[in-house]
Image (spheres, coloured by chain):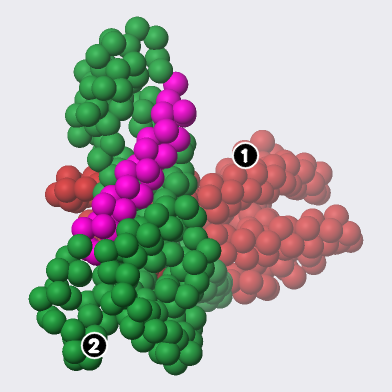
Chain colours: A red, B green
Amino acid sequence: MQFTQDLSFLHLISNASVLVQVVMGLLLLVSMTSWLYIFQKLLVLRREKRLTAEFEQAFWGAANLNEFYKLVSAIPDAERGALQRIFVAGGLEFSKLKKHALGNDALMEGTRRAMRAAYQREMDRLENHLAFLASVGSVSPYVGLFGTVWGIMNAFRGLANVGQATLAHVAPGIAEALVATAMGLFAAIPAVLAYNRYSHDLNRLATHFESFGEEFSNVLQRQP
Amino acid sequence: MTAAAYREPYRAQAGVLALLVHAAFFTFLYFGVSWQTFQVESMSVELWDGLPVPAATGAEAAPPPPPQPIAPQPVEAAPVPAEVKPDIVLPDKQKPASRPPPKVASKPVEPTRKPSLLERYGIGSSDGGAASGNGRGAGQVQAEVARERAGRLSATQKIIAEYVARIRAKIKGNVIVPPDVPVNALVRFSVTVLPDGTVMSARLTQSSTFPAYDVAVERAILKSQPLPLPQDPDLFNNFRELRLCFSPFREDLCR
């Protein structure tokens, strides 16, 4: 009765019970989505940081603010960075209000409100999907654990039907079940890392945007 | 430009990268992880199934065995001094022809040239048949064979008894008798033994009602591996399933 147990990976998955397979499928889906967002955010944030740095350099190096504004507003919207949009929103509002010949305070107030609104919108866009990464990071280990517990329960129930119980009877079942935990962790660990990394990056970007907004309003106030 | 109209850039690239990550991960799992458990087969049974017959002729020629097998020799020689001669001559003639097979076929038997009961008995009967063709009375041969058989039987029984005693002595030496064991404590074990003397299982068949002593004896049985077994593989069948009885103070209870 020479028998070998081939515990290859596919074997483990195909032998698992239906519920464990469903859990594994769910986790695979979640993992795919979270990796999609991880890469997407990585690319988006990298681009945003590059554009912000470039724009700040160009803004402080610009000799004429009007010229610079025209230059930036000529860029198509899809190619603008968040900070450029904030700048354009502020500049547009300023030029509009100026035509109404309001008082200086009201003028500055309106411009700042417009920039604030643009800033909120940009932050909302950049933060998009970050909550998903956070939930994947916290929930998917539990989902995997649920699959594992279920699989182990089944393994032990099978053990009860065997007269002479040996480790060989339970071990494959437990190994199958543990694959669910492994998948949950595989989904969770990168999600948590990415979430922490990206929220840190976003905080820094937000600080940049806010301080730029204040500085830009100062510049506008000095405008004749 | 509303939030709905806004589409996150890099979606396709991110999707491809995510797929790549998963593909890499699963490739790693598929090729890197394949646990294989080989059930080690501990039972190597009946290696010497057909051996007694070829070994029989060689057995006559080589008499360098431990003391026990020598004992039967005079017994068998005594009752039939004259007629035995052709019996011995015949196998001697066959010897050169039939000797190689045991060497090739059965290594374990080769070193143990002792005349075992079964082997001898096999020869006795077949040679007896040949001899009867030479003009001996069949009844005489039968009686002779029966007597021989009786002699051999008692001889092997002696060997078996001796080895059982050795096994018991070895185990007894390893028993650490726990304190406060009742004087008339008695345990019986059924011990399954492998040909090399390893204990495959020791099953308690009668408890001494003093669990500490039961456990001590079981531990001693396991500690006594390999158990002393006779070199003759044919005798092993008698040791396959040993029923052993132990008593810490009163050996006479076991009889």
Q: Which residue is mark 2?
A: B130
Amino acid under label 2? Ala
Side of A44 where B108 appears, left or right? left
Dot 2 and dot 1 residues touching (CB under 8 Å): no
Q: Is residue B19 among what the camera can see?
A: no
Amino acid under label 1? Glu
**Badge 2 and badge 1 both on one subunit:** no
Which sits in the foreground, A203 or B180? Answer: B180
Q: Residue at x 72, y 63 (%)?
A: A51
Magenta stretch: includes residue A68: no
Numbered circle sitting on residue A109: 1
In the picture shown, does residue A94 fall above or below B18? above
Q: Position of residue A157 (x, y in %)?
A: 18, 46
Q: CA distance from mark 2 to mark 1?
A: 130 Å
Magenta stretch: includes residue B168: yes
- Helix, strand or loop: magenta stretch: helix
| Callout 1: chain | A
Residue numbers of the magenta segment: B148-176
Instruction: Tell me the mark number nearer the camera, choosing from 2 and 1.
Output: 2
Which sits in the foreground, A43 or B122? Answer: B122
In the picture, the quarter occupied by the N terminus of chain A is bottom left
Which type of secondary structure does the marked residue at label 2 adopt? helix
Residue found at the very far top of the displayed protein: B180
Q: Position of residue B234 (x, y in %)?
A: 33, 63
Q: Residue at x 18, y 84 (%)?
A: B136
In the picture shown, does residue A12 fall above or below B188? below
Task: Residue B217: name its quadrant.
Answer: top left
Q: Is residue B164 among what the camera can see?
A: yes
Side of B50 where A9 appears, left or right? right
Which sits in the foreground, B195 or A160? Answer: B195
